[in-house]
Image (cartoon, rainbow, N blue to C red):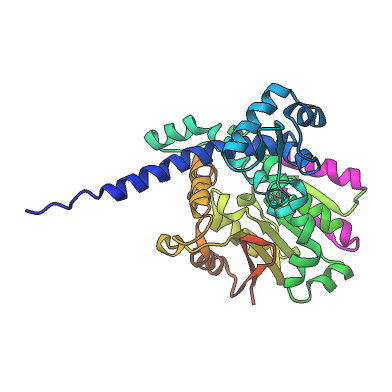
Amino acid sequence: MTTNAFDEAKAESFAGKMLDVMNYGMLGVLSSIGHQVGLFDVMSGLSPSTSEQIARASSLNERYVREWLAAMVTGGIVEYDPSAGTYALPPEHAQSLTRSAGAGNVAAFCQYIPMAAEVEQKVIDSFRNGGGVPYSAYTRFQQVMAEDSATVHDAALIEGILPIVPGLIERLQAGIEAADVGCGSGHAINLMAKAFPNSKFTGYDFSDEGIAAARAEAARLGLSNAHFEVRDAAGLDERDKYDFITAFDAIHDQAKPAQVLKNIAGALKPDGVFLMVDIAASSNLHENLEHPLAPMLYTVSVMHCMTVSLAYGGEGLGTMWGEQKARQYLADAGFTKVDVQQVEGDDFNSYYIATKR
């Protein structure tokens, strides 16, 4: 009988990795706070400043700002001059931490960490007893998702994303019927409705909060061609109505994704186009080993996407259901042609252009 020798160097290396996980996880929480209260944005416009000056410029409590700065300094995010007692956010760091970075603002994505922690005990209960955590348990989900998607859509939806569908811009300009399934706060619909006034747009979502926000934004923009309905996509029963349907990172969250896709196929006219945007990944774990965001995305799946689906007796596809499975689901729903593309500036997603003929 032989036993493997204990590798002390491996053990020490792994212990160091776990310390990094703990340190950077906590820094992620404070980065989320820094984003929400505007500290990164304020510091990016300041010369090296004291904690009092930064707090004053941010209209925040100095004691909290000072302790936050200490974590940022020891974490290598903010630079500190002990002789002058000043703090500075290097422009090279600000590029990944401020709202001006757009989709490159990692601090904004850090909001998913405390959002996940908020339901930790409920997820633990699901580990032990099955089931899942319902959508209603996530108090900031609509707000965080709206900010996340708006960053991408404001920058690229009209000029970068929609043009990947052949002939779509011309059809939208002429006037067609379009819909967005799982529209959330409706920002994508409102952007399209504003850009293409001859077309009519309908957004569907089962969140009362999301639809209320969508309608409010449409009213502010004075849009008469944007309509929103509170509806579960699994019950969508339109037939041959729409020329164009979108679903932005929404299908993998569904309790019944196969049924939703069949409903979308049925709601499309014979020559209609479905643009499904979803996480860029493989359906096979071993093919995601080098994915730079795989640990985060699998965690988001456990803490939100998978568990929410399971809470409603769903399939629990999970965030990383991947291209192979997505293609199969689309084929089973009746889409005979599927083209998968990437869009510059959006490293998270793949863009599936699906038609029924």
The residue lying toward the viewer, choosing from 94 and 156, is 94
Q: Is residue 220 magenta?
A: yes
Q: Is residue 207 visible?
A: no
Q: Is residue 92 visible?
A: yes
Return the x and y of residue 105 as percentages of the image width and height: 69, 49
Residue 188's place in the image compared with 268, above or below, is above
Q: Is residue 199 left or right of residue 248?
A: right
Q: Is residue 217 left or right of residue 16?
A: right
Residue found at x 86% / y 46%: 218
Q: Quadrant of the C terminus?
A: bottom right
Q: Is residue 338 magenta?
A: no
Total marks in image: 0
* Residue farthest along the front direction in this orientation: 83
The residue lying toward the viewer, choosing from 58 and 213, is 58
Residue found at x 63% / y 50%: 235
* Residue farthest along the right direction in this orientation: 222
Residue found at x 70% / y 58%: 238
* Image: magenta residue range: 194-221
